[in-house]
Image (spheres, rainbow, N blue to C red):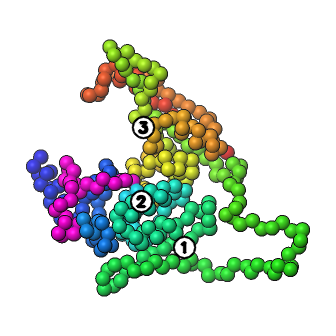
Amino acid sequence: MSDKVSATAMMNDSPSIVELNVGGVYYSTSLETLRNEPDSHLAKLFSDANRHKAIRDAKGKYFLDRDGVLFRYILDYLRNLKLVLPENFHEKDRLRQEAEFFQLPNLVKIINAYTSRHLHPPLPTLVASKDPQTGASTHLSPVQPASTSKPPASPPADSVSPTAEPMVNNINSSPSPISERASGFITVGYRGTFAFGRDGLADVKFRKLSRIIVCGKVSLCREVFKDTLNESRDPDRGEFDRYTSRFFLKHSFLEQAFDMLQEEGFIMVGSCGSGTNSAGEVKPGLDTEESKWQHYNEFIFERR
């Protein structure tokens, strides 16, 4: 036991490796990354003069009482001095709030310029340039796309037929109908039980859900569940065109998940359940009566 404690202490005291606990989500990074923006809150917190004052959790990790899921974007920016958000990202305001807290003004500018694709045409990726002498970020420069072809010139006003329909910009176009959306499957599952009152009596109308699991294609899951989707347990975060079984929802309301699926054109095509666990061993710390009602259900939704 002492060997494990000493090994943890050596890692935390290392001049280059930093173990973080941000709102319950663990990160490992370098001291150089945290100091990449010299005037930021993190650079000041982990400076040689202030690092010993930082709060640590029970495992010796530096603790930050902030949004642990959104901190991944803060860390990505500090590593690359640019921001790449996934499609259908719906927490821009909250991310801006985190950037303001960590005193990253250039990141705030990038977030303000980063517009969702369904509202405006995509903007070029903005990169923060650094002063080679001071190391501070100076200005934002757009990354030019690979293609340099010019868009076709608009016809003169007098050459347009008076009977022709006016062209409509993508900004004002209505959302695509359900028939034009991508097809696919999403599986929603949950493990639950029922609450128990006095004398071990079960209230079967009061269910208890520990977590609602979401499995399927990443793009479909993000499209349907938006900011209610929690991706903190997914090891391959950042990739878009793939499948995962590691998403879950930030709430425990099964009907809310069903409503969101229905609004996006999904219908339920199958379901299965395990029933109740009337027999078997009871895990330590669990109520004996309540554990008998444990069950697992899955619901399969399809959009054609």
**In the rendered image, which quarter is residue 122 located in?**
bottom right
Give the SS element for disc 1: loop
Indicate the position of residue 178 as horizontal and vertical percent values.
Answer: 69, 48
Q: Is residue 184 above or below residue 46?
A: above
Residue placed under numbered mark 1 in the picture = 124
Q: Is residue 244 above or below residue 164?
A: above
- The image position of residue 235, as x and y in percent, is 40, 53
Q: Which mark is residue 304?
A: none
Task: Please state the extent of the stretch shown in magenta in the rendering.
Answer: 46-69
Q: Which of label 3 and label 2 is nearer to you?
A: 2
User: For the residues marked 3 and 2, what is the alpha-carbon distance in whole angstroms?
Assistant: 27 Å
The residue beneath circle 3 is 211
- Amino acid identity at mark 1: Pro
Q: Is residue 25 above or below residue 208?
A: below
Which quadrant is the C terminus positioned in? top right
Q: Is residue 5 above or below residue 257?
A: below
Measure how far apart labels 1 and 2 are at the Cα level: 22 Å
Question: Of marks 1 and 3, which one's residue comes earlier in the chain?
Answer: 1
First in residue order: circle 3 vs circle 2: 2
Where does residue 66 sit, x and y in percent of width and height? 34, 54
Q: Secondary structure at mark 3?
A: strand
Using a 10 Å C-alpha cutoff, classify the residue at mark 3 as few (fewer than 14 neighbours), some (14 to 19) or many (20 or more). Answer: some
Q: Nearer the viewer, residue 249 or 96?
A: 96
Of marks 1 and 2, the one in the foreground: 2
- Secondary structure state at the residue bearing disc 2: helix
Q: Which residue is denoted by mark 2 in the rendering?
A: 97
Task: Tell me the residue at 49%/31% (across/down).
Answer: 297
